[in-house]
Image: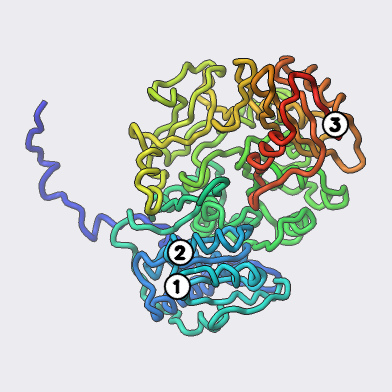
């Protein structure tokens, strides 16, 4: 039907009284006004209240403006989880600029590429990373304003910049009159994907998405006001899954941590009253297998942990729950501001056996409140697959927490958004209850003799072996079957197992064709966020050659 004139169409326009662009910057202004004396940040002996933290963020914005930094200028930060990085999440966008938090594990050439591609005008860098930053700056095609973070807890390192962070802050005004973005679609952050082949892509976030996903985190986790949040998740990773803004919205306390170590985490739980933390399954595994004297520090404490980054093995979830941690499983990508789905829990599931609840909790679940669409569908036709828990398709998303696009890469953006959905590249199934379960990345699925093998399924079985600490499975070329599963295994300290034992255990718990035909023992290569670098393992498996169908065991 043609549109008809309506009284709702005239005289009801948006104006400054009834519309303000959404931005997470308002969270800190409210927090400082309502809870000025509430503890905001803990970092070693440093303690900041919310009024002070807000003033420092305004000083940073002012100092940047006074150096000519404004709308859509890029400010890069190379640092661990310190107060300076948290302040940059507010101070940089308060100046109208875009925050580019750098992965601290990158080499000089990659950092130089990112600084050039993102056109950073300022680099705030921790002295710990001076060796790699000095090399990167020599490769950058223009001069940057470099500011040093001279953290007392950092290892000894050379200062490279014009001045240190505290001196730079002192050049700014604590009463700086920052303004909300004129458009909530304005960029707030730039994050680069982990480029395992070729250069990484620059993912652009907007203020609206950051605002919504920050609140989405609080909703799905039922986070209380004044939560005490431990920074085990890197703030450079998807802007810490938007938790710099989430915790601030709740007037919580940010407990900073330079090193993700079991001793430091358990100490923070015991001494600072940590109530929440996030981390990849590798962090859970580290906590689960820490010495008993450390694990006792968490006894009797209600600690909630959000995990994502890779499908967590059900056995690891069960173990953490037995320690007293309450695990929530989320899933997302750099392109979705971090978490975008959650394994929303049903009370009746609590009555199920631990093994069954662990398997349920390992699913990636349903969409966040702030994600509009989620489906598993055919990658070409976008036709949804049956909700049978078996038919594999690609996971698709749409909504306000999907990135603006890839910086200076319209071709990649168009491909990612083809058909009006964001193509995740992850393969999964849809269960009858509407919960999704990731089976693999499209590049990780093993096709053996025409049969699809989920590496995640095989890994879940390996993690149940009593001697296995960590496991990862990739494809190995095979003359007979095309490719077969190759397992890379790290054993628990003091444990022993042969390759034959590992293979037989898998055959007892899987269809025979899914069991690994190759087992390689040793440490697993990982990214800075704890993800196993499967591209490196694939190269190792390829280098082993095709065995012609006979099982190969590597000790």
Task: Say if mark 1 contacts mark 2, CB within 8 Å.
Answer: yes
Residue 182 is drawn in which quadrant? bottom left
Q: Within 10 angstroms of label 2, few (less than 14), some, or many (20 or more) residues?
A: some
Q: Secondary structure at mark 2?
A: helix
Residue picked out by circle 3: 466
Task: Specify whether residue 350 is in view.
Answer: no
Q: Quadrant of residue 153?
A: bottom right
Q: Position of residue 116 (x, y in %)?
A: 45, 64
The quarter of the rendered structure image containing the N terminus is top left
What residue do we see at 71% from left, 34% from top?
541
Alpha carbon separation for disc pair 1 and 2 = 8 Å
Ranked by sequence position, the earlier of labels 3 and 1 is: 1
* Depth check, front residue: 133 or 435: 133
Residue identified by numbered label 2: 116
How far apart, in angstroms, are the residues tagged by discs 3 and 1? 54 Å
Residue at image mark 1:
142
Residue 490 visible, this angle: yes
Q: Position of residue 351 (x, y in %)?
A: 69, 24
């Amino acid at each position: 039907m043609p549109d008809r004139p309506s009284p709702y169409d005239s005289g009801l326009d948006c104006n400054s009284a009834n519309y303000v662009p959404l931005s997470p910057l308002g969270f800190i202004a409210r927090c400082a006004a309502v809870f000025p004396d509430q503890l905001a940040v803990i970092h070693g002996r440093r303690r900041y209240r919310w009024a002070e933290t807000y003033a420092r963020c305004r000083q940073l914005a002012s100092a940047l403006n006074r150096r000519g930094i404004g709308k859509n200028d890029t400010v890069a930060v190379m640092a661990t989880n310190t107060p300076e990085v948290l302040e940059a999440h507010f101070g940089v966008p308060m100046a109208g600029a875009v925050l580019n938090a750098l992965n601290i594990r990158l080499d000089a050439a990659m950092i130089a590429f990112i600084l050039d591609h993102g056109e950073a005008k300022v680099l705030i860098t921790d002295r710990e990373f001076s060796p790699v930053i000095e090399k990167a700056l020599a490769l950058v095609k223009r001069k940057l304003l470099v500011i040093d973070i001279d953290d007392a807890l950092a290892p000894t390192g050379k200062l490279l910049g014009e001045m240190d962070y505290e001196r730079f802050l002192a050049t700014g005004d604590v009463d700086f009159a920052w303004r909300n973005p004129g458009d909530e679609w304005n960029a707030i952050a730039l994050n680069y994907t982990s480029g395992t082949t070729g250069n990484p892509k620059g993912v652009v976030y907007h203020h609206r998405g950051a605002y919504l996903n920050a609140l989405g985190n609080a909703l799905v986790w039922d986070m209380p006001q004044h939560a005490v949040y431990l920074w085990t998740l890197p703030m450079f990773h998807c802007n810490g899954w938007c938790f710099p803004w989430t915790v601030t919205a709740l007037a919580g306390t940010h407990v900073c941590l330079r090193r993700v170590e079991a001793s430091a985490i358990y100490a923070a739980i015991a001494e600072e009253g940590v109530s929440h933390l996030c981390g990849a399954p590798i962090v859970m595994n580290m906590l689960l297998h820490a010495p008993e004297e450390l694990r006792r520090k968490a006894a009797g404490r209600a600690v909630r942990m959000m995990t994502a980054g890779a499908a967590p093995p059900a056995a690891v979830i069960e173990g953490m729950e037995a320690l007293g941690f309450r695990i929530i499983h989320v899933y997302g990508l750099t392109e979705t501001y971090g978490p975008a789905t959650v394994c929303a829990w049903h009370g009746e599931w609590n009555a199920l056996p631990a093994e069954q609840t662990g398997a349920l909790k390992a699913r990636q679940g349903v969409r966040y409140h702030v994600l509009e669409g989620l489906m598993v569908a055919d990658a070409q036709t976008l036709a949804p697959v049956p909700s049978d828990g078996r038919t594999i398709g690609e996971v698709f998303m749409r909504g306000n927490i999907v990135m603006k696009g890839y910086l200076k890469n319209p071709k990649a953006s168009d491909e990612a958004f083809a058909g009006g959905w964001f193509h995740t590249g992850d393969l999964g199934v849809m269960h009858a209850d509407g919960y999704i379960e990731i089976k693999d990345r499209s590049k990780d699925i093993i096709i053996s003799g025409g049969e699809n093998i989920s590496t995640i399924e095989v890994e879940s079985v390996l993690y149940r072996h009593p001697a296995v600490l960590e496991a990862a499975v990739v494809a190995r070329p095979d003359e007979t079957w095309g490719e077969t599963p190759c397992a890379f295994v790290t054993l628990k300290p003091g444990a022993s197992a042969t390759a034959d034992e590992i293979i037989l255990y898998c055959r007892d718990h899987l269809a025979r064709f899914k069991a690994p035909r190759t087992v390689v023992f040793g440490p697993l290569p990982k990214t800075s966020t704890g993800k196993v670098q499967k591209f490196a393992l694939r190269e190792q498996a390829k280098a082993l050659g095709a065995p012609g169908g006979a099982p190969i065991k590597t000790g």
